[in-house]
Image: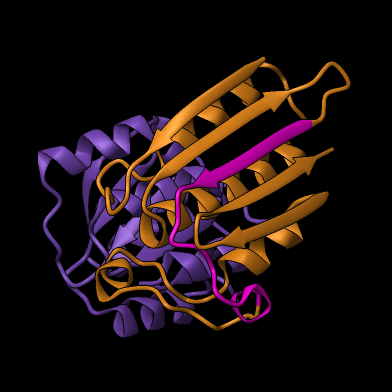
Chain colours: A orange, B purple
């Protein structure tokens, strides 16, 4: 099973809908509730990051035959200048608008990493590519 | 602590009931924040017995509650919940309540009566 969702920059109104759909799909498929919670949190955090920080991108969700959940987040820039700094708990470059919507604590990437079984991120000015798996 | 008692303690009103099961939940604790980022970090192991208390009134509070498997949100400072937001609560299976008290007084009153002690 594979699904792709388009995520728009600064679309705070619809932010979270893709993650909710992925959660509903996995719940229907009977995924372990503890794994589902981790997927749900990490997916929502990453979706919010796409809305807040990127110029738009996609979420690709896949559930393989072994029951492993794969999530990929691919945007078209502007990229993360310093990933190590961005991973530091409490560091944030979120806009005032993002904070008004309840985000920008600087905990997102760290939270995703803690939720995921595997976590990889690459970034350049052409885009950021984040992959997570969950078992 | 049942939701009826919580509503009495903070003079809160029902805005939207997603499922009447919310009346049967024995709430064990609450988390008060206007930062959904904090809720997503701190409530990773939460379940329906955790009450989210917030002064935010936007769609992201419902996505956050849904993500964390929470059943109810208590909005403080008498924020308006419009029809559009109620649709968001419905989509996220979350019940919504509003009190006119501030975050500080809401949390204080509930803690004093034993929620989360």
x, y percentage for residue A95? 31, 74
Asked if residue A40 lies left or right of residue A33, the reply is left
Asked if residue A40 lies left or right of residue A99, the reply is right
x, y percentage for residue B103? 31, 78
Q: Nearer the viewer, residue B114 or A61?
A: A61
Residue at image x 63%, y 40%? A72
Asked if residue B35 lies left or right of residue A120, the reply is left
For residue B57, what is the image quadrant?
bottom left
Asked if residue A125 lies left or right of residue B60, the reply is right
x, y percentage for residue A106? 52, 76
- Is residue A130 visible to us here? yes
What is the magenta range? Answer: A69-87
Q: Nearer the viewer, residue A6 or B12?
A: A6
x, y percentage for residue A129? 61, 50
Residue placed furthest toward the right: A66
Residue A82 to residue B40: above or below: below
């Amino acid at each position: 099973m594979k699904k792709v969702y388009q995520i728009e920059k600064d679309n705070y109104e619809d932010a979270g809908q893709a993650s909710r759909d992925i959660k509903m799909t996995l719940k229907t498929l009977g995924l372990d509730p503890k794994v589902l919670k981790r997927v749900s949190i990490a997916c929502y955090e990453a979706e919010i990051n796409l809305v807040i920080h990127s110029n738009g991108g996609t979420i690709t969700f896949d559930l393989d035959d072994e029951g492993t959940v794969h999530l990929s987040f691919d945007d078209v820039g502007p990229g993360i200048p310093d990933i190590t700094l961005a991973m530091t708990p409490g560091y944030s470059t979120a806009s005032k608008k993002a904070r008004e919507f309840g985000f920008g604590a600087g905990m997102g990437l760290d939270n995703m990493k803690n939720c995921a079984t595997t976590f990889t991120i690459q970034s350049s000015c052409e885009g950021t590519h984040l992959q997570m798996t969950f078992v | 602590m049942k939701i009826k008692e919580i509503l009495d303690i903070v003079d809160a009103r029902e805005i939207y009931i997603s499922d009447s099961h919310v009346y049967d939940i024995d709430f064990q604790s609450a988390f008060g924040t206007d930062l959904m980022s904090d809720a997503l970090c701190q409530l990773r192991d939460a379940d329906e017995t955790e009450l989210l208390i917030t002064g935010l009134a936007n769609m992201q509070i419902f996505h956050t509650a849904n993500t964390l498997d929470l059943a109810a949100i208590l909005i403080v400072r008498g924020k308006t919940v419009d029809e559009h937001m109620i649709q968001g609560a419905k989509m996220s299976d979350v019940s919504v309540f509003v009190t006119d008290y501030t975050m500080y007084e809401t949390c204080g009153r509930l803690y004093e009566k034993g929620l989360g002690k």
